[in-house]
Image (cartoon, rainbow, N blue to C red):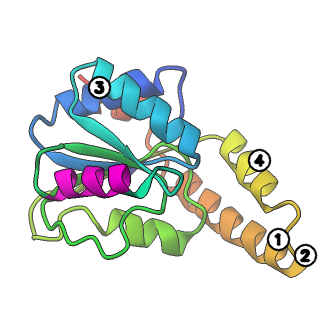
Amino acid sequence: MRYAQKTNNIDKDIIKFIKNNPEKSGIIYCLSRKKVEELAEILQANGINARPYHAGMDSMTRTKNQDDFLMEKVEVIVATIAFGMGIDKPDVRFVIHYDIPKSLEGYYQETGRAGRDGGEGQCLTFYTNKDLQKLEKFMQGKPVAEQEIGKQLLLETAALCRIFRVPAQDIAALFR
């Protein structure tokens, strides 16, 4: 597993990573539906067979994208956390978090989708403090107790990312 501070070139970094891992199946998690759609389009424009997946899509398209991923007609699925529950695809080779995950438990479940068949599985997480601010904003309006629990989960996840942060030069090596 690798953790990296986001750069201005995160989309470019992800494209290079995927192209350096051709014909490998992967999942990219994003916090928002908008980012899922944007990133899927960017990947497609760069010759990567990617599709979006999120709860806001019509069910027929969402089901088709999921089925195409499971049947290996699509290499990369860009998704919110709505994707993955009940998915049994043992040959996922990479999981990328475009944004910091909401909790360590969620992160554990999501990264656990890589390499289930005992083969290679790579996990890469990009994050910034803005991710934390975005998630805190999502929690506004929820009951105070829920906000407190959510904030604690975020702080734990952020601490893990800081502890295991990989120096920029090591992350750059992934994309050569």
> In this rendering, would 41 be left or right of 17?
right
Task: Residue type at mark 2: give it.
Answer: Val
Tell me the quarter of the picture where residue 50 sits. top left
Dot 1 alpha-carbon crowd within 10 angstroms: few under 14, some 14 to 19, many 20 or more: some
Q: Does the magenta stretch include residue 61?
A: yes
Spatial CA span between label 2 and label 1: 5 Å
**Residue farthest along the bottom direction in this orientation:** 145
Asked whether the beta carbons under mark 4 and mark 3 sit within 8 Å of each other, the answer is no
Of the two numbered discs 4 and 3 in the rendering, the one whose residue sits closer to the viewer: 3
Numbered-mark total: 4
Nearest to the observer: residue 154 or residue 2: 154
Nearer-N-terminus badge (4/3): 3
Vertical placement of residue 9 versus 103, above or below? above
Circles 3, 1 touching at the beta carbon (< 8 Å):
no
Q: What residue type is labelled 3?
A: Gln
Q: Give me the residue at 53% from left, 26% from top.
A: 7
Residue 165's tag is none
Query: What residue does disc 4 label?
Result: 133
Q: Residues under labels 4 and 3: Cα distance?
A: 29 Å
Residue 62 in the image: x percent, y percent? Answer: 36, 53
Which element carries disc 1, helix, strand or loop? helix
Taking the spot 42% from the left edge, 26% from the top edge, the residue there is 11
Sequence-wise, which precedes: disc 1 or disc 4? Answer: 4
Give yes or no for contact between labels 2 and 1 (Cβ–Cβ under 8 Å).
yes
> Which residue range is magenta in the image?
60-70
Name the residue at 42% across, 50% down.
79
